[in-house]
């Protein structure tokens, strides 16, 4: 069994790892936070994809920031850049919750006027 045949069988049985990697990169670049108050879902999916790509945390932090809802992104941009993706995801969840609660308070105030 020659190398080319062996490589062909591996790709046939397990898939092309480069194609899979590019597909993961495409998914992470297209991932967006869809709903205020639900950042945990966004960060979990982001970390799931990130764990399979192998970039440095600085790169991930930039990409996770880009996918945030604008209101959360504005708050994130006011803070110091976190050192790790773990810290960034925790910060994002906290900021998202803050934005969600602030929005709910504003809506309650309008209703009670």
Image: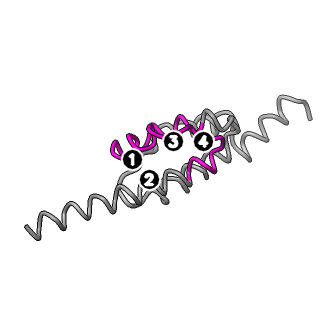
| Mark found first going from the N terminus, 1 or 4 | 1
The residue singled out by tag 1 in the image is: 72
Mark sitting earlier along the chain (3/1): 3
Task: Say whether disc 1 or disc 2 marks the residue closer to the N-terminus.
Answer: 1
Which residue is at the front of the view, 48 or 106? 106
Residue with the most extreme left position? 113
Q: What residue is disc 2 on?
A: 95
Q: Disc 2 on helix, strand or loop?
A: helix
Residue to which mark 4 is pinned: 82
User: Which residue has dot 3 on it?
Assistant: 64
Chain-order first, disc 4 or disc 2: 4
**Disc 4: CA contacts within 10 A as few (<14), some (14-19) or many (>=20):** some
Contact, mark 1 vs mark 2 (Cβ under 8 Å): yes
Between the C-alphas of marks 4 and 2, the distance is 13 Å
- CB-based contact (under 8 Å), mark 2 and mark 3: no
Q: Secondary structure at mark 1?
A: helix
Of 6 and 87, nearer the camera is 87
């Amino acid at each position: 069994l020659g190398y080319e045949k062996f490589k062909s069988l591996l790709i046939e049985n397990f898939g092309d790892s480069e194609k899979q990697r590019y597909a993961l990169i495409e998914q992470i670049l297209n991932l967006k936070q869809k709903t205020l108050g639900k950042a945990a879902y966004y960060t979990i999916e982001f970390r799931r994809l990130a764990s399979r790509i192998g970039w440095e945390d600085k790169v991930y932090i930039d990409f996770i920031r880009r996918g945030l809802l604008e209101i959360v992104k504005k708050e994130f941009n006011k803070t110091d850049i976190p050192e790790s993706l773990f810290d960034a995801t925790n910060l994002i969840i906290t900021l998202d919750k803050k934005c969600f609660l602030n929005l709910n308070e504003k809506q309650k105030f309008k209703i009670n006027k």
